[in-house]
Amino acid sequence: MEVGIFARTFEAPTLAGVLDAVAAHGIRHIQLNTSCMGLSDMPDGLDSAACERARREIDARNIEVVSLSATYNMIHPDPTARAQGMRRLEVLAAHAAELGADLLTLCTGTRNPDNMWADHPQNASPEAWSDLLAAMKQALALAEEHNVRLGIEPEVSNVVSSPEKARDLLDAMRSDKVTIVMDGANVFPRGTIHRQHEILDEAFDLLGDHIALAHAKDLSRDGEAGHEAAGTGLLDYDHYLQLLHHSGYGGAVVLHSLTPEQVPGCVRFLQEKLHNYA
């Protein structure tokens, strides 16, 4: 396992500037967001020539794009918003290979119309699950057409709120194109942080064979996804990384939810932890 980072952690007027900042910290693996290319997070269109220029910049620094962010609210209460998100997902799927990516990270979504990461009472409804299955079937068709994988992330405030629901979704989709993005800071319902080892153990028992990407951040309280930089909160990183290792995962562990100023300390923290699994 090696350290990776969300490229958009760094702000620069050009993609080259972002990549230079990544490389300056000795990082060689990124989750790319098209905002780093001067576009929106989910653009309505992508130009192949622009993607190929971006790929040359990435390759010139010996950086690997381990995933491409493709998050939109898959169960938004407005069907028009869902359809728009799916069209934009198709844009990213069609151009992912040009950027060197074969994994698109998704947000399974929420009935909250304003924030795709915020909880809503209707997330647990049968209708929300039905809408998710319909969206995932469309997304899977795109993944098969463009030969990319989809990464779903158990996240307490989304419709896939637990490892158990992520397992249910994997079973419903029955495709190796649907994989797991594991973030140990995202899976603790309110009042459960004292049981974090048990909850993480269960998560890896259910999902460990399907992990395509690991995220690294932290949390200050349970009941919502973590928002803190890795090593600054309550997550037992020794336990989390041990579970990743034992699952057979050998890819990037991608830092996010950190400021540029926190990068050196977080990289050092994670490198020291990962040294045990070199």
Image (cartoon, rainbow, N blue to C red):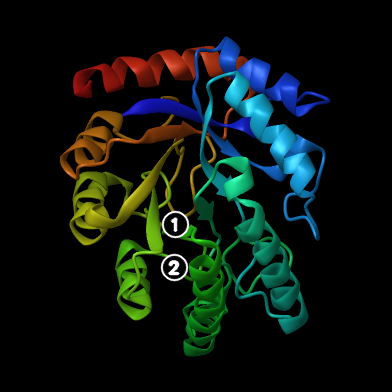
Q: Is residue 74 left or right of residue 180?
A: right
Q: Residues within 10 Å of mark 1 (few under 14, many from 20)?
A: many
Q: Residue at x 29, y 20 (%)?
A: 273
Q: Earlier in the sequence, mark 1 or mark 2?
A: 1
Whole-percent x, y for residue 108 in the image: 53, 66
Whole-percent x, y for residue 261 in the image: 63, 15
**Residue 139: quarter of image:** bottom right
Q: Which mark is residue 153?
A: 1
**Can the viewer see residue 258 in this picture?**
yes
Q: Residue at x 65, y 16 (%)?
A: 21
**Can the viewer see residue 229 in this picture?**
no
Q: Residue at x 30, y 69 (%)?
A: 167
SS of the residue under disc 1? loop
Q: Which mark is residue 160?
A: 2
Q: Residues within 10 Å of mark 2 (few under 14, many from 20)?
A: many
Can you say which quadrant of the picture contains the N terminus? top left
**Residue 256: quarter of image:** top right
Can you say which quadrant of the picture contains the C terminus? top left
**Residue 171: quarter of image:** bottom left
Whole-percent x, y for residue 25 in the image: 54, 12
Q: Verify CB contact (< 8 Å) between mark 1 and mark 2.
A: yes
Distance from disc 1 to disc 2, alpha carbons, whole Å, reads 7 Å
Q: Is residue 82 left or right of residue 106?
A: right
Whole-percent x, y for residue 213 in the image: 40, 45
Q: Nearer the viewer, residue 158 or 53?
A: 53
Identity, as a three-letter code, of the amino acid under mark 1:
Glu
Identity, as a three-letter code, of the amino acid under mark 2:
Val
Question: Is residue 187 depicted above or below 98 in this figure?
Answer: below
Question: Is residue 7 depicted above or below 146 in this figure?
Answer: above
